[in-house]
Amino acid sequence: MNIEQNQIEKHNDSLLTAHQRRFAFLQEEWEHVDLESVIQKLVDFQIAIPSWALGTGGTRFGRFAIAGGEPRNIEEKIEDVGLLHALNGSSGAISLHIPWDIPQNAEELRQLASGYGLKFDAMNSNTFQDQAGSAHSYKFGSLQNVNKDVRKQAIEHNIEVIKHGIALGSDALTVWLADGSCFPGQLNFRRAFENTLESLQEIYSALPEDWKMFVEYKAFEPNFYSTTVGDWGQSLLYASKLGKKAYTLVDLGHHLPNANIEQIVALLLMEGKLGGFHFNDSKYGDDDLTAGSIKPYQLFLIFNDLVEGMDAKGMNHARDLGWMIDASHNVKDPLEDLLQSVEAIMIAYAQALLVDRKALSEAQQNNDVAKAQEILQNTFRSDLRALVAEARLRAGAALLPIGLYRYLNVRNTLVNQRGKTSATGL
Ligand SMILES: [Mn+2]
């Protein structure tokens, strides 16, 4: 299904007067700020949609399917991300997962994606599951495995993923390992680290010059005693030893409770080793909930440090880090959920862009703690939805993406086209 430009325009016309009133109010409120440059940054900012989030997610207890219409193949996954991008103008990339999305004809896929204005973001490998027909099992880890043949199989898989990515025009590989141990004594930590590093080095040497490798960490699960890339320190250790193309990837749900993620982000940026993000939200663990649904203030504080740190280094917000969603939703329509995640991320980014940096820096210099808090909360508590909507309007997207999605009965259309399908993935 495609959304036509005239459908978007008709929708926008019906909401335009109310939008203009709200936007004019913001222009007055923020007249001391160059709002035009903020809007341009919002227009430029794109968040990659993971192919595995387009189907309904499950939990370890099971999976409740939605009405259907889930993408049956990689082409339909691209079509779904195209729908999201038409609606919000901010989802201009798709992140693929091998072996769930093995491209048969890379050139055709590139053309299909570019027709929707989409790029191929970081490629994801999978050594956390055994695939049918593989010679070796990852039950006791992949890149860390005590058995060299298992490690070799996992290394070759990652190199295969890089090759698919090259053919599609991607420029990054995300490696998330489920490796670790479930019980004390199971693993020699040092040897597991050394095996993993040696395996990563082999994969790294297959990366093209202009590629990045993102080393994603996770504190626990599916291993519950130790994980071999367990936190940002361990990821940074691998990335530093690997070389300049390797970076740490921060998945918001992969920390122990109450971790100060914004501080982690600030220091990784300072070291030039922050690669990118997997956005989601959580109350307890790696809950993979909609970005901003539980802790919107944390999301804002992360963006606050991102904007400050990237500006300090002269980095381009849109291009110099990888921005991806990694979520899985078991009770919502996945496309509506992704629209909500993107909206929450854009709002947090907009809030961070409007922080009065000069005043904050002065307050910090004067140890004026109350003032510093006032400055941050002033933008966090401002309703910037009309600013983000204005950026969408200028990008030719919908003023109210979920409203238009529902008005056009997109899900029903997809069910009629595809049947009661469910997508590959989680
Ligand atoms: Mn992730």
Image: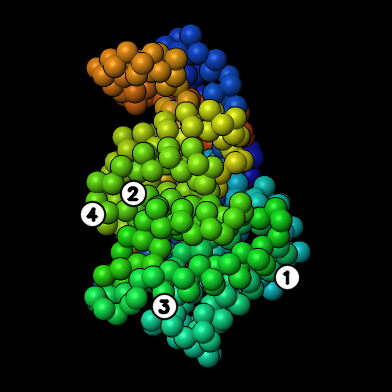
Q: Earlier in the sequence, mark 2 or mark 3?
A: 3
Report the Cα–Cα distance between label 2 and label 4. 10 Å
- Give the residue type at disc 2: Asp
Residue 392 shown left or right of residue 231 in the figure: right
Report the Cα–Cα distance between label 3 and label 4. 25 Å
Q: Which numbered mark, 2 or 1, is in the foreground of this view? A: 2
- Give the residue type at disc 1: Asn
- Toward the viewer: 322 or 392? 322
Report the Cα–Cα distance between label 2 and label 3. 27 Å
Instruction: Check disc 3 and report its element: helix, strand or loop.
Output: loop
Q: Are marks 2 and 3 in contact (CB under 8 Å)?
A: no
Instruction: Check disc 2 and report its element: helix, strand or loop.
Output: loop
Q: Which numbered mark, 3 or 4, is in the foreground of this view? A: 3
Report the Cα–Cα distance between label 1 and label 4. 41 Å
Residue 141 image label: 3
Instruction: Check disc 1 and report its element: helix, strand or loop.
Output: loop
Residue corresponding to mark 4 = 284
- Toward the viewer: 300 or 153? 153
Q: Earlier in the sequence, mark 2 or mark 1?
A: 1
Q: Could you tell me residue 319's position as x and y percent?
A: 61, 41
Residue 105 image label: 1
